[in-house]
Amino acid sequence: MSSDIKQELEKALGTASKAEPKPQPDNEFQKIFDIFKKTLSGKIIKTPLEEVHILDENFCYLIKLQWKNPKTNQWQDASPSIVLPLLEARILDAMQYRLEDPRRARALPGLIYLLGKPEFIYENCRHGKNGGIRGKHVYVQHHSKGQVKVAFTIYDPRLRKVVPVSSFIVTQGWLDRCTDKKPPIYCRTKATR
């Protein structure tokens, strides 16, 4: 029996199975999620200051994933309870989402090293303030051309764990404004020869 006839017969008899959703072709968000799952998901990093848990439910916030709400026509933070199952099933419609800050996704691959071996850890002076950056601690590594890689962590009382909330590359001036130029609470010492 040809597949066309079989499908028509199933449709007429009401026995046609519901079509499985087709996986979306690989998209930017799926690729980022796949890397996250392979290299970061479920890791616990012992930093010089605290234990940081990298959890799937923080993925959307870590990369600042947003979706366009059709009712308001506004971009809103994506909900992990909606997005994660779609990414796991590989069916997230990339056309409905965006990265509000693409620097965050680019910084993900270096997150374990940054948290585990920071040059400095500062108190985040902008935490909880207007125009602030969520996160109590700022982990810092200096790179070439004046670039500074930072990661922010915070204790999540709901999870009862310290989690990373964001990571990206900034300038020294930006870091100075974030730390109010206060001394670090941790400074890695260089080995002497």
Image: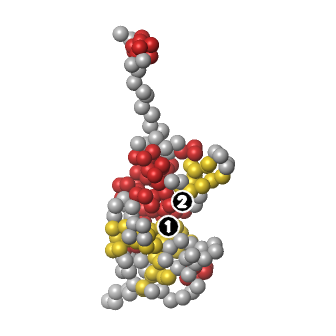
**Compared to 186, does 82 lie above or below?**
above
Residue type, mark 1 in image: Ser
Quadrant of the image for the C terminus? bottom left
The tag on residue 166 is 1
User: Which residue is found at the position 60% from the left and 74% from the top?
Assistant: 132
User: Which residue is found at the position 44% from the left and 16% from the top?
Assistant: 11
Quadrant of the image for the N terminus? top left
Q: In this view, does 85 lie to the left or right of 168?
A: left
User: Which residue is found at the position 45% from the left and 86% from the top?
Assistant: 185
Crowd around label 1: few <14 · some 14–19 · many ≥20 (10 Å): many
Residue type, mark 2 in image: Lys
* Mark found first going from the N terminus, 2 or 1: 2
Q: Give the image location of residue 89, x and y in percent.
A: 41, 42
Residue 68 in view of the camera = yes
Residue 31 in view of the camera = no
Viewer-nearest residue: 48 or 68: 68
**Compared to 80, does 89 lie above or below?**
above
Instruction: Label 2, secondary structure: give it.
Output: loop
The tag on residue 64 is 2
Q: Give the image location of residue 90, x and y in percent.
A: 43, 42
Q: Give the image location of residue 69, x and y in percent.
A: 62, 48
**Compared to 84, does 171 lie above or below?**
below
Viewer-nearest residue: 138 or 58: 58
